[in-house]
Structures are given as C-alpha cells and as structure tokens.
Image: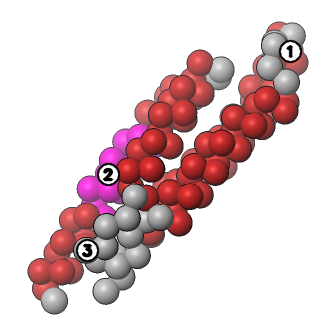
C-alpha cells in the first residue's frame, strides 16, 4: 500500500524550495541596496544546498506503508538551514517557523494515516 509521506511531506519540502529561492532574490535586493557583503553567487550556492537537501529528502521519503527510509530525518535537517537563513533575511525566521510547523503536522498526519490504513488492511 502506498504511503502518504510523499504526498504530505513532499509537498511541504517542494514549497520550501520556492520560498528559499524567493528569499535569495530578497536577500540579493537588500544586499545591493545596503552594499552587503554577500554576492548573488554565494546566495544561490546556499539556496542550492538547501534545495539539494530538500530534493534528496523527497526522493528518500517512504513510498510504501511500513517502509523505513531516511527521508523524514533528512527533512528535519532541511529545516535547520531554512531557519538559519533568518540571519540573512530576518523575515525568514517567521517563514521558517511556519514551515517547521507545517513539517511537524505533515509528518504527524502522514504517520497517523499510514498507521490507520495498515490497521484496516
């Protein structure tokens, strides 16, 4: 039976990708305005690391109920640099808090739905 982790958790991680790259544009615009020290290349490198982690974690999410894969743990790791990006763009602390809450809820509900489907089968 198919797991709900790729649907629920994967959608959160993919949405984080878009937010991270929009944050890069914001950070670059603010750095240009304030003559900051980070270049666009450095910002894109940081965003690409977060994106790569998120994509790998989506690929490693459990596909079947009861399957043990490291995608969920790696998804937790993705939340750390997302939160740390708040040091570059302060509003990212708020955005990261929202995504961490969404991640917690998606992990909880994915596990619960999978458990209930397994009990019925």
Residue beneath the point at 33% across and 47% down:
104
Q: Position of residue 36 (x, y in %)?
A: 81, 12
Which residue carries the number 2 mark? 105
Separation (CA) of disc 2 from disc 3? 19 Å
Q: Is residue 10 left or right of residue 67?
A: right
- Is 59 magenta? The answer is no
Which residue carries the number 3 mark? 66
Q: How is the image coloured?
A: secondary structure
Disc marking residue 33: 1
**Does residue 89 appear in the picture of this structure?**
yes
Separation (CA) of disc 1 from disc 2? 37 Å
Q: Is residue 58 above or below residue 64?
A: above
**Which span of residues is magenta-colored?**
98-110
Badge nearest the viewer, 2 or 3: 3
- Is 99 magenta? The answer is yes
Q: Tell me which label, 1 or 2, sits earlier in the chain.
A: 1
Q: Tell me which label, 3 or 1, sits earlier in the chain.
A: 1
Q: Is residue 19 above or below residue 41?
A: below
Q: Tell me which label, 2 or 3, sits earlier in the chain.
A: 3
Q: Is residue 54 above or below residue 65?
A: above
- Are discs 1 and 2 less than 8 Å apart at CB? no
Q: Residues within 10 Å of mark 2 (few under 14, many from 20)?
A: some
Task: Give the secondary structure at mark 2.
Answer: helix
Residue beneath the point at 48% across and 34% down:
80
**Does residue 8 appear in the picture of this structure?**
no
- Indicate the quadrant where residue 38 lies: top right
Q: Position of residue 99 (x, y in %)?
A: 46, 42
Q: Is residue 59 above or below residue 100?
A: below
Q: Position of residue 111 (x, y in %)?
A: 25, 64
Separation (CA) of disc 3 from disc 1? 51 Å
């Amino acid at each position: 039976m198919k797991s709900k982790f790729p649907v629920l958790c994967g959608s959160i991680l993919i949405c984080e990708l878009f937010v991270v790259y929009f944050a890069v544009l914001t950070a670059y615009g603010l750095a240009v305005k304030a003559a900051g020290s980070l270049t666009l290349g450095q910002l894109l490198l940081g965003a690409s690391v977060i994106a790569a982690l998120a994509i790998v974690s989506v690929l490693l999410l459990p596909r079947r109920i009861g399957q043990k894969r490291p995608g969920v743990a790696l998804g937790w790791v993705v939340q750390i640099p997302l939160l740390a990006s708040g040091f570059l763009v302060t509003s990212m602390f708020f955005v990261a808090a929202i995504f961490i809450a969404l991640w917690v809820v998606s992990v909880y509900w994915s596990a619960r739905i999978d458990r209930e489907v397994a009990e019925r089968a």
